Amino acid sequence: MRHDGVTIGWLVLRPLKQPEGRRDKAFLASQVRNMALLASALLLLAMALAWFFARHLLAPLRTVEQAARQLSDGKYGVQLDTCRQDELGDLVHHVNRLSLALQAHETARQRWMADISHELRTPLAIVRGELEGMRDGVRMADAAGLQSLHDEVMRLDHLVGDLHQWSLADQGSLSYRPQPLDLAELVADACARFASTAREAGLQVESDLSPAPVNADPDRLRQLADNLLGNSLHYSDRGGRVQVSVFNEHGEALLRVDDTPPGVPEQDLQRLFEPLYRGELSRNRAHGGSGLGLALAQRIALAHGGHLSASLSPLGGLRLELRLPRRVS
């Protein structure tokens, strides 16, 4: 070692001397053995702790795996208990929500299939009875009998048409050819088409239509307007009225349809646009219907950049409101 150019000392590394005495060798062997035992004990302890914590961490994952298998087997409604507040707890909560959603969808599907089967069976039974009566000579093949057959066939055609249209919309296969048009004129035509239906149902249709230019597919928008107006006429009690309005608001074209009772419970309003959904009250079940009309109308509205909503009407029934982007000249 040097300081200011002057050697002040030396550092020498001498090789470690191997133990030569019996006592030294015994001591070294004892230390090596103790270190090996200590290392083995620490390794076993680490393995035990790792197994314990792995089992603790994997237990909820195994529970989630079992729940996922039950869901894949069609056993919906599975609910898992957890008090965890970490990512695994979030996973369990998501699985629980998924399970409830699948159960609700399956219940709606089964109920809808039962309703559709009933709706198809009823007109088929009437047509069969009418035809068998004419064949056996019990009923004359007169104008009234033929009209009854025609009505039931049209009812079947409406149900099958709804199913076909919804399948196309669900697959994204509905074609749209937008063009400039006036929403008020299109709605006026719809009101004219439903005039005889309203008279037969004992309903009064009131309209207040202001010009509302939009870019839309005329066939799809006509289908949407028919669904909204037909829904109100179909479900309103005899002697009631339907108000149809078209106006502009905040850069949007609005179509609003209000009807008189019966209404829809407020908690069911948003579910009206769910496919396969049919409410439990007389407004829906007593009048039949496929449960697809409003869901299909919502799809058409969204495809045009608009939105369809439902709320309680001041008339005591249902308010359906369509909002579309207004065409700028």
Image: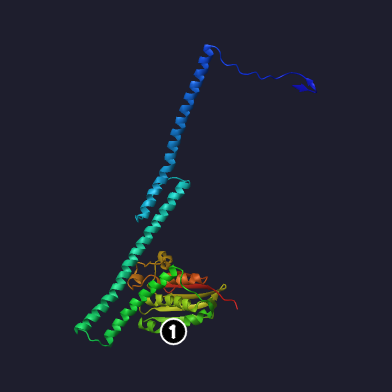
Foreground pick, 270 / 115 = 115
Give me the residue at 35% from left, 64% from top.
Answer: 109
Residue designated by label 1: 192
Can residue 96 be seen by looking at this rendering?
yes
In this picture, is 17 found above or below 96? above
| The N terminus - image quarter | top right
Task: Give the residue type at disc 1.
Answer: Ala
Q: Is residue 80 left or right of residue 38?
A: left
Give me the residue at 41% from left, 55% from top.
Answer: 98
Give me the residue at 47% from left, 80% from top.
Answer: 187
Q: Is residue 231 left or right of residue 209?
A: left
| The C terminus - image quarter | bottom right
In this picture, is 56 found above or below 310? above
Q: Residue 308 placed where, x, y %? A: 47, 70
Quadrant housing residue 284 = bottom left
In this picture, is 145 found above or below 160? below
